[in-house]
Image (spheres, grey):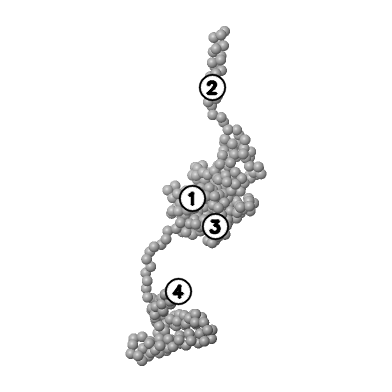
Amino acid sequence: MTRKLVQLMMACLIVVVALATVPAMPVLAAALPDDTPSIISKKCYRNLLEAADFLVVIEANIPYAVPPTDPVTEVFLWDFIDTDGVTVLGSTVGWPYVDSGYNYQCFSMYFSAAEGLIWDPTPSYNLRLSGNPLAFVTPPIYNYSITSSDYSTLIVSSEVQAELTLDILIMAADLDIRWGLPTSLRTDDETGVTLSTFGQAYFRGAIYGIQNLAPQLFPLTVTTIDLTDRTWTDSYVTTLENQWVGTWVQTAKAAGGTLFAVAYDLLSIILLLGCIIGVFIGNTMVTNNHWNAAIDVAFVMVVTAKLGFYGLGFLGLVAALSVIYLGMRLFKFPH
């Protein structure tokens, strides 16, 4: 009798130890959404970072007046389904930043060129929202089709990035209204409308790599500066010199050079110098301010240079001397 009791106790001990080592199964506690989840907008983009890459961005609503205790990452899964309706090409679980990831949210999936997705296929790709079997007794499944109108028509990388930027800002404005939070996802700054700090935190989680996919969404961006040397020509100077060809002005200018036996219109320069002196003296007498007179003189010199009465090189020389003089006056040199 004692031996049988010992054997029974050993058997109970083994059962208790075995049960203690079995992993605890999660409790199936998630309730179904209050209504059928819906897609507010969906769009596919290509050539964002490299030729033939593929990005799909979704704004969807998984409606819950009282969201489940577990975040959306543990309850629902988005799948990108191939044209055969079976093969899963990619998946995402969203970003539980607001409302634990339920109700109105942004979801995305990015595919590199190496993954070989076909652009605008017929029949189309599909999206599937399915419940996690660990969260539901009977996991719900919702299917959505991607139509030809959901594809961006742009192919140039910079243009596609600009389109994505605008679409995200529109989505951010929509989420601002739907969430009704005191902090906006957008902000106006020196560079235009960009994502606020709150918006950056949200979309960087919802769209992985958004900093590179749409850099204009951020107030500070890293860009490559074009350091190619500029090729300088004298085409503009030539244009100014030839603007009077075939007119009486050209004849008069040629005569002005012939008068002093030089190859340029020295007469016009002498007349211009007299005009400048007259403007300076006349303005000073009227306003009693030689700085005001200097402004009028500068105006006359720029206009006459544009009309080709003297070379731009001489105008540049006068401008350089003026800058030196102004610097000396400004810093009171010499003391």
Residue 262 position in % (x across, y down):
33, 87
Q: Are marks 2 and 4 in contact (CB under 8 Å)?
A: no
Kind of residue indicated by mark 2: Val
Residue 247 visible in this rendered orientation of the protein = no
Q: Are marks 2 and 3 in contact (CB under 8 Å)?
A: no
- Residue receiving disc 3: 194
The numbered mark, 2 or 4, whose residue comes first in the sequence reads: 2
Residue 155 place in picture, x, y as percent: 47, 58
Query: Which badge, 4 or 3, is on the more N-terminal residue?
Result: 3
Question: Real-space Cα distance between discs 1 and 3?
Answer: 16 Å
Res 281 seen here: yes
Secondary structure beneath label 1 = loop
37 over 217 or under it: above or below: above
Q: Earlier in the sequence, mark 2 or mark 1?
A: 2
Q: The N terminus appears in which quarter of the rendering?
A: top right
According to the picture, the residue beneath numbered tag 2 turns out to be 17
Number of numbered tags placed on the structure image: 4
Q: Residue at x 42, y 61 (%)?
A: 225
CA–CA distance between discs 2 and 4? 94 Å
- Residue at the far top in the pictured view: 1
Residue wearing tag 1: 209
**Residue 39 numbered mark, or none:** none
Is residue 254 found left or right of 291 in the rendered image?
Answer: left
Measured as percent of width and height from the top left, residue 323 is found at 43, 75
Q: Earlier in the sequence, mark 4 or mark 1?
A: 1
